[in-house]
Image: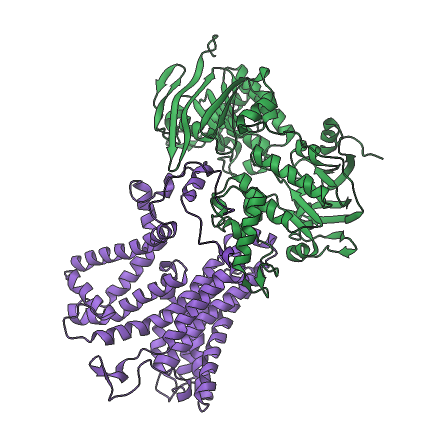
Chain colours: A green, B purple
Amino acid sequence: MSATAPANAVEMRGITKAFPGVVANNKVDFTVRAGEIHALVGENGAGKTTLMNVLYGLVHMDEGEILIDGKPVHIGGPRDAIGKGIGMVHQHFMLIPVFTVGENVMLGREPVTGPGFYNRVRAREEIAELTRKYGLALDPDARMADLPVGLQQRAEIVKVLYRGANILILDEPTGVLTPQESKELFGVLRDLVKTGKTIIFISHKLREVLEISDRITVMRRGNVVGHLVTKDTNEQEIATQMVGRAVLLRVDKKPAKPGPVTFKVEDLTASSDRGVPALKGVSFELRQGEILGIAGVEGNGQSELVEVLAGTRRATGGRVLLGDKNVTTFDARTERDAGIAFIPEDRRGAGLVLSYSVADNLILGRQRTPAFAWRELVLRLVAIRDWARRLVKEFDIRTPSIETAARNLSGGNQQKIIVAREMASRPRVLLAAQPTRGVDIGAIEFIHRRIVAERDEGTAILLVSAELDEVRSLSDRIAVIYEGKIVSIEPGDAPEERLGLLMTGGGSARG
Amino acid sequence: MAASPATVPERPRPRLPATARRVASGMAVPVGSVVLAFVIGALIVLATGGDPLAAYQGLLCGGLGAFCTQGENPALQVSSTIVFTIPLIMAGMAVALPFRAGLFNIGAEGQFLAGAIACTTIGIHLGTLPAPILLPLVLLGGMAAGALWAGIAGVLKATVGAHEVVTTIMLNYVAQWLLRYLIIGGPLQLASGTSKSSPIGAGARLATLLPNDNNLVIFGLPSSVYRVHSGLLIALLAAAVFAFLLWRTTLGYEIRAVGQSQKAARYAGVSVRRTIIVTMLIAGAFSGLAGAIQIAGIDHNLTDKYFSDTTGFDAIAVALLGLGSAVGIVLASILFGALHSGSGVMQADAGISSSLVLVLQALILFSIAANFLGAIRLRLPGLGRAPAARPPDSPAAALMTEAAAPPPEGSPSAT
């Protein structure tokens, strides 16, 4: 058990780490007390991950020293870090899907009998003991691939604990979790702290940070810019420190002035990739100049819905009408030509060709339109350049040049490329799926403002987001999707509790 | 300028202009692979009791007409190198274009043979037609046959998902055995007992670049001995078409998009299936043209020497070594053409088996494929720019490195 006095579990002094062309950590001081949950916050590229990689031995610092439990240590690699009781749960799990939970946890440290036979019984016992001790319910014989993401993450935590970690680093642990799973995770973290563990929680979600942490360290551009005590601070203060200026956390929008119905979805059905029905009769109407938000726990058909509407997945039934035109069977290109624009949820995979330049990405999907191609055949390079320069300026895409590969931009600027491209085509309908996922606060603020501005120009907008906050702050009406059906359409100011209940299959639909 | 990075602070001054640096770092792997191959080749020669200097001197003489000691005619050697280079350029495009679409066309050889067969067939049966009609006909026929051959693989890939590596390899065999049937006992056989076809009509033949005149002496030899033919111009034109297609057309844009991310391409309204088929058709046309030109420009008939032709396989190495770019492929074709042409001189002068050239080609291909140099650079961060040192988690770092690049070419707004 931990010491009674709040000694420092981790003390990092004057950590400096430079990569070619950028100082990722500039004389960073970072102290974590034993037995606390310490949040490390900052925007993408602020240096949080680099600092933690230094602590975990994945990156070697140029200068500075590290003290663990008050003793100076040298960490040459993850092995050293593990030896010092440091464990890291990565954002992307390091698990083998076809192995069982037990095999995954034991991997590399398997209990063996005789000349190297895996001792399944002892493995199971050890895991059972770990899970009992920390209150982490987990079946050691379940196949990893069959578990929901929340439990996979739990297995990662158990794996780290099994290796004897006292200090756990969690890198954006809630990024992949549903709100319910996040709540469960927080319960687990609180229990772990009670048993004397120390937790470093990397996040950019301020509400979570306020909910779970004891103290907060804020980083910006490689520097520590603030040490905060959670109970004495608020979202606004953290955001201001992170971004370096006052940020508008609430979306400033006037009441919608909805026009006539311009987009109608009637009894739409579709199957998922695995061939099981994912949409079971979805119907809604979208008016000009309004934002209809789709709220729901991920995996309830939102992705399929957007894909069908975007023309990249075939509907198995029902109709989609744009004005009077039936566009159900249109493909991505004909839909675009008809005036439907889309921001896909998978930015890096579907929204961009990462190796293409900013300019080339800004015409993706419109490469054959007369503005950019002569007779659909030859690209008009000058027109494309002018167009790219204009959008880069108008949408504040921070890039060294329009010839820079999209790969080299930050997530926020990548997303701005997509937003710029889709909005600049003056669509009648805009489908925005997870428009701010993994994007920094500054870009979120910008994208939200543009979406509202687009609405005010009369575009009909369908917003699909896993972030309930985002749906609530932007939408004029909210449709809740559950198991492939719209269970209710709520007003934009519906209380969070009611939406949460509807999202998990509870509550009753409005009249 | 709108794109100027006002938000990127204190970027380091570039030491070289960005394009030069990009070209230099792009060239590192292919040049390094060639150098490495020659070093290992020298060790092999040394280990087997030969003189590597003499071997490479022979290669240089036979390939580039330089450092000749036995009185070889340099111009003749250069001509020979160009003759070998011509089909490699076009077959190289046939491999490189599908590469851009994420397809691996191993079937350039089969497409090459299909083109040669079609050219010969047309050239024999319509042999009496005048050149202005017949010549375009045999070349287009060769392209069509190559396109058909590759198109089969493309359609199979796009419709039933048959892997193009397997289907194109199989189609190579089909083409090879078809050729054997045609000229041994088949309809194209010249006479029973021979293993070659009748010659194509005079109108189907590509002119040599130098006059076919026994009395005109050029570089000390009658000009009729130089076999370099006008197919060279066609090959260079094909390279220009390839580059234009890839970088300046919507089709090229879509081909590259499909190669980089099928999902993004689909979201962009690109039909992935259609693009795959069209890519293979064009690729096959390039390779088929190579085969047709080889018949129309050099051999004028199909012979058993085509049984062991390797143009389409060498093309894979050429495409890789040339990094899939038009200029790179032309340069790589020249290298392979020179190696091919030089092997005879090396064997005659230095007494080193011409098979050494095949070893060198294999070593080049191998070290590119294995990306040896990349691996070495990973281990020794002191060498080169070491991309591995870039932290995966720091997009800012990547941005900064790119930020070192000055804005691209001048603003076109002046016009």
Name above or below for residue A321 compared with residue A434: below
Q: Viewed as shown, does residue A258 lie left or right of A302?
A: right
* Point 73% across, 55% down: residue: A327
Q: Is residue A407 visible?
A: yes
Name above or below for residue A440 compared with residue A331: above
> Can you give x and y, in whole percent of width and height, for residue B290 in the image?
41, 73
* Point 38% across, 30% down: residue: A17
Q: Nearer the viewer, residue B251 or B407?
A: B407
Q: Nearer the viewer, residue A305 or B208?
A: B208
Quarter occupied by residue B404: top left
Name above or below for residue B193 compared with residue A402: below
Q: Nearer the viewer, residue A148 or B235?
A: B235
* Point 23% across, 72% down: residue: B344
Q: Viewed as shown, does residue A100 lie left or right of B180?
A: right
Quarter occupied by residue A504: top right
* Point 15% across, 75% down: residue: B71
Q: Viewed as shown, does residue A131 lie left or right of A502?
A: left
Q: Is residue B173 visible?
A: no
> Can you give x and y, in whole percent of width and height, for residue B20 in the image?
35, 52
Q: Viewed as shown, does residue B176 lie left or right of B49?
A: right
Q: Residue furthest bottom?
A: B128
Q: Residue furthest front?
A: B414
The number of numbered discs placed on residues in the rendered structure image is 0
Q: Residue furthest top?
A: A4
> Can you give x and y, in whole percent of width and height, for residue A406 in the image?
50, 46
Q: Nearer the viewer, residue B13 or A230?
A: B13
> Can you give x and y, in whole percent of width and height, for residue B357 in the image?
26, 65
